[in-house]
Amino acid sequence: MSCVCSDGEGRAWSVEMNGWFVSLTVSLALVASMAAPPAAVPQAALDDFLRGRVAAGDVPAVVAMVVDRHSTTYAGAFGKQNVAQKRDLRLDAIFRIASMTKPVTSLAAMMLYEEGRLSFDDPVTKFLPELANRRVMTTWHAADNTYESRSPKRVITVRDLLTHTSGIGYPFADARLAKLSAAGTAEADLPLLHDPGERFTYGSSTALVGRIVEKIAGEPLDRFFRSRIFDPLEMADTFFVLPPDKRDRVVTVHTRAADGSLVERPNPPELRSDARGDGGLFSTAADYSRFMQLFLNGGRTRSGRLVKEQTLRTMTSNQIGALVVREQPTAQPAVARPFPIGAGKDKFGFGFQIEAPPAAPGMRSVDSLSWGGIDNTHFWIDPRESIAAVVLMQLLPYYDDRALAVLRGFERTVYGRIVGGAAPPLKRDPAADAQQPPHHNR
């Protein structure tokens, strides 16, 4: 069954009733979170679980934080920030959050949409005319790693970029793109994997959103982020280029070897990333928690309104209609395993995966928002329970079995006593958490 829905710009579009239902319930859940009481979380049980996973050698380090609308209800840091140097992990440790940058970029685009400077149905060629030459791969010749292609059936729109339905993929998730990339094909010259709007394919679409934000705003992406998002949210530890005085707080990255052991990669002397919309930020659990709280509070910060509630409703509603998030395969098992959880049923908004029914028993609620970063950094926002959580690790491959077990085990423990009552939540200020000295490692 289908119905006609509005995208918030006054334009109507048709979606299957199931997609419409998710869109409606996400919006209602966002409103309901404004009045929902804080959820209690089992602090001792969470400490025991994370400490145990580190002690067992599943992951070398993990910082986790749970927040409600106004406070931190749980914060824990376990393991070593730098194993070789035997440096304990702190709550204010800085992580590479990779694709957790994407929701930030999507919010930046939503701000421009709110100001009437961007439409979801704008063709991307309006801002990036060079994309007019992107073609769709039709046939792959494995013998010599060549392909045949054609023009897409329609132009890529801003909506396609925000929902990962543009046809743009990542080489690590598609063997054909991996071979082309290894042979020297530039990212901008890789073919589309399908026509725009045809299905969900995870790729670098949000990098193009970042470039569009720069074109419209007339300033570099990192400067827009700082003035419009990070400073208002008091995200003082989030950067593309890390200041030298913060370098000693950055967690090293480990790789899971074939025998299951962990191999540590020392941090380079300079920690910096290109200012791309699809990844590259360094951040902390406390900073990203402030970003998540913006959504629990309907666009309000402690100092006032940052974005309209209706804008966030649009951003966090189903924007792919009858399509679903598809499982993304792996072409580079050392980088990523197949992902994400919820593939085959979940929806996608503008920057977020949306939990569709049925939700796993004892886990995040239907309508929860989530995504993750390649080094196994993860978050979810649960408007129904008025909580959000971030679990930060630095371990490859993405969706490593043991890292994923840490995420899901932590989540299961968080929800284990939310329903039915628990001890009052521990009230902490994320700003104060970031100042904890090293001996607060557990």
Image: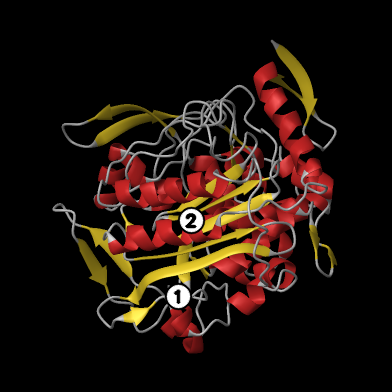
Q: Residues within 10 Å of mark 1 (few under 14, many from 20)?
A: some
Q: Can I make out residue 98 in this image? A: no
Q: x and y percent of residue 308 in the render?
A: 84, 52
Give above or below for 165 relative to 228: above
Three-letter amino acid code of the residue under disc 1: Arg
Q: x and y percent of residue 229 in the render?
A: 70, 66
Which residue is pictured at 57% across the width and 72% down the height? 238
Give the distance between the C-alpha atoms of the residues marked 1 and 2, in whole angstroms. Answer: 36 Å
**Residue toward you, 189 or 317:** 317
Q: x and y percent of residue 263 in the render?
A: 21, 65
Helix, strand or loop for disc 2: helix
Three-letter amino acid code of the residue under disc 2: Ala
Q: Can I make out residue 30 in this image? A: yes
Question: What residue would you read off at disc 2?
Answer: 45
Question: What residue would you read off at disc 1?
Answer: 272
Q: Where the C terminus falls, by quadrant?
A: bottom left
In which image quadrant can residue 340 be found? top left
Q: Where the N terminus falls, by quadrant?
A: top right
Give above or below for 67 relative to 236: above
- Nearer mark to the viewer, of 1 and 2: 2
